[in-house]
Image (cartoon, grey):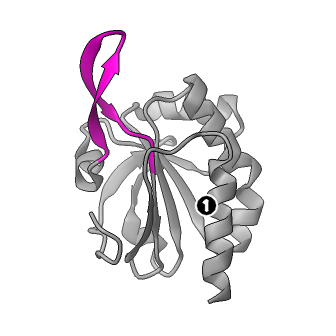
Amino acid sequence: MEVNDTVADFTLQTDEDKTVSLSDYAGKPVVLFFYPRADTPGCTIEACGFRDQFRKIQNTGAVVLGISRDTPKAQKKFREKYDLPYTLLADVDETVCKQFGVLKQKNMYGKKVMGIERTTFLIGPDRTLLKIFPKVQPEGHAEEVLKVLKEMKKD
């Protein structure tokens, strides 16, 4: 997927076991952040960063959605444990991960495995892909996204 592409609609289960589609957020920018696994150190830092910047991100008109291959139950536990104020999506069958091309070969303790490369996509109100944040560093990432959202709002 490239910047300026139209993002195809998708539908997933939320942490509350409801069904949600990207098209449900038509007219609003969407911050879609992919993370490897709920309640692991880097993912917790990233998710809590978005939690801590959530009000400011909301003030730009944007919606925050976190997404991983965890089950809705694991996502719910993660969201409740860290008081995350936004929806987490469960991509158990990896459909949306494949759509966005975030599954990469990783080296885990000397074994090659396929996993999610931490990536954030900023999707415009009309589902145009506005920005890709590849190989995200969890610390300070939410602030980086907020800065871009504020700049876009000025334009």
Q: Residues within 10 Å of mark 1 (few under 14, many from 20)?
A: many
The magenta-colored residue range is 102-119
Q: Quadrant of residue 39?
A: top right
- Between 37 and 3, the residue placed more toward the observer is 3
87 in relation to 30, above or below = above
Quadrant including the C terminus:
bottom right
122 in relation to 35, above or below = below
In the image, what residue type sits under mark 1? Val
Secondary structure category for the residue under label 1? helix
- Prevailing secondary structure of the magenta residues: strand
**103 magenta-colored:** yes
Say which residue label 1 marks: 145
Q: Is residue 107 left or right of residue 41?
A: left
**40 magenta-colored:** no
- Between 12 and 121, the residue placed more toward the observer is 121
Q: In this view, does 6 lie to the left or right of 28?
A: left
Q: In which quarter of the image is residue 128?
A: bottom left
120 in relation to 136, above or below = below
Q: In this view, does 24 lie to the left or right of 12?
A: right
Q: Quadrant of residue 121?
A: bottom left
Residue 30 lies, in percent from the top left, at 51, 66
